[in-house]
């Protein structure tokens, strides 16, 4: 972040995929589907029967999904070069001063990438594990072969240290409308770790 409190391309460090080395900095328990990343100090307890990978986007570090239902949960992390003025900045306060700069590229990239239109976009203040988040929600229409349906995206975004975390759930809207409370609880399975801490150690204490 520069002095004007805006995000520039050259403020963003190389993604995990660009800078990945032979050093092991993440772990996935193949039985419980518990994922822990020790570089970014983040973990997620994915549903046991979901498939997992590192996603296709540049800054995606983890993705869990059901191939036959279009249900996907992903974690994206961007590392920023922060100056002293911007360290510890609250993402909601930052958003209040930069709505247009944050919303426009966010929705435009979706529309251009998927050849669709974003509908019912909203953004509100929320929290994950006591960290202030932007909670965004919107949907878009998918037309594929003889099928047509709406996909709902719910994302929580937060700043923590020098990292920007985005947790996203993509789900057919018809599934979400049947049981919204259940799908919202997926975000409760996100955990922020201390150095060297593992998620299974946290869960044993609960």
Image (cartoon, helix red, strand yellow):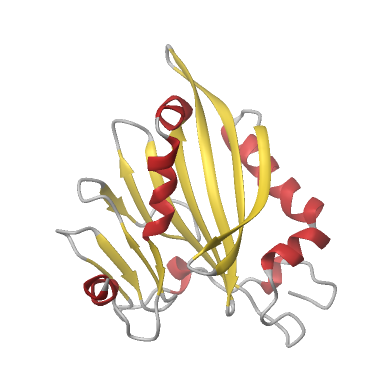
> Vertical placement of 4 versus 154: above or below?
below
User: Quick one: 56 or 166, which is closer to the camera?
Assistant: 166
In percent of width and height, residue 146 lies at 42, 11
- The part of the image, by quadrant, that contains residue 147 is top left
In percent of width and height, residue 160 lies at 57, 75
Residue at the spot 45% in from the left edge and 74% down from the top edge? 19
In percent of width and height, residue 161 lies at 58, 80
Location of the N terminus (image quadrant): bottom right
- The part of the image, by quadrant, that contains residue 112 is top right
Residue at the spot 24% in from the left edge and 77% down from the top edge? 201
Residue at the spot 73% in from the left edge and 88% down from the top edge? 84
Q: Residue furthest front?
A: 206
Q: Residue furthest right?
A: 4
Residue at the spot 80% in from the left edge and 71% down from the top edge? 5
> Vertical placement of 31 versus 78: above or below?
above
In percent of width and height, residue 136 lies at 61, 47
Location of the C terminus (image quadrant): bottom left
């Amino acid at each position: 972040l520069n002095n004007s409190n805006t995000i520039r391309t050259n403020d963003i460090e190389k993604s995990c995929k660009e800078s990945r080395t032979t050093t092991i900095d993440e772990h996935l328990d193949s039985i419980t589907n518990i994922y822990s990343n020790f570089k970014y100090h983040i973990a997620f307890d994915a549903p046991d029967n979901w498939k997992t990978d590192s996603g296709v986007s540049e800054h995606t570090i983890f993705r869990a999904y059901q191939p036959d239902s279009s249900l996907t949960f992903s974690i994206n992390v961007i590392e920023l070069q922060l100056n002293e003025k911007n360290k510890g900045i609250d993402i909601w306060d930052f958003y209040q001063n930069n709505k247009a700069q944050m919303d426009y590229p966010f929705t435009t990239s979706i529309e251009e990438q998927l050849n669709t239109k974003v509908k019912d976009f909203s953004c509100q203040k929320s929290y994950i594990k006591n960290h202030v988040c932007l909670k965004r929600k919107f949907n878009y229409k998918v037309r594929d072969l003889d099928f047509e349906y709406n996909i709902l995206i719910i994302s929580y975004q937060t700043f923590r240290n020098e990292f920007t975390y985005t947790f996203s759930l993509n789900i057919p809207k018809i599934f979400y409308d049947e049981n919204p409370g259940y799908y919202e609880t997926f975000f409760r399975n996100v955990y922020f770790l201390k150095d060297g801490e593992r998620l299974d150690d946290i869960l044993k204490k609960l």
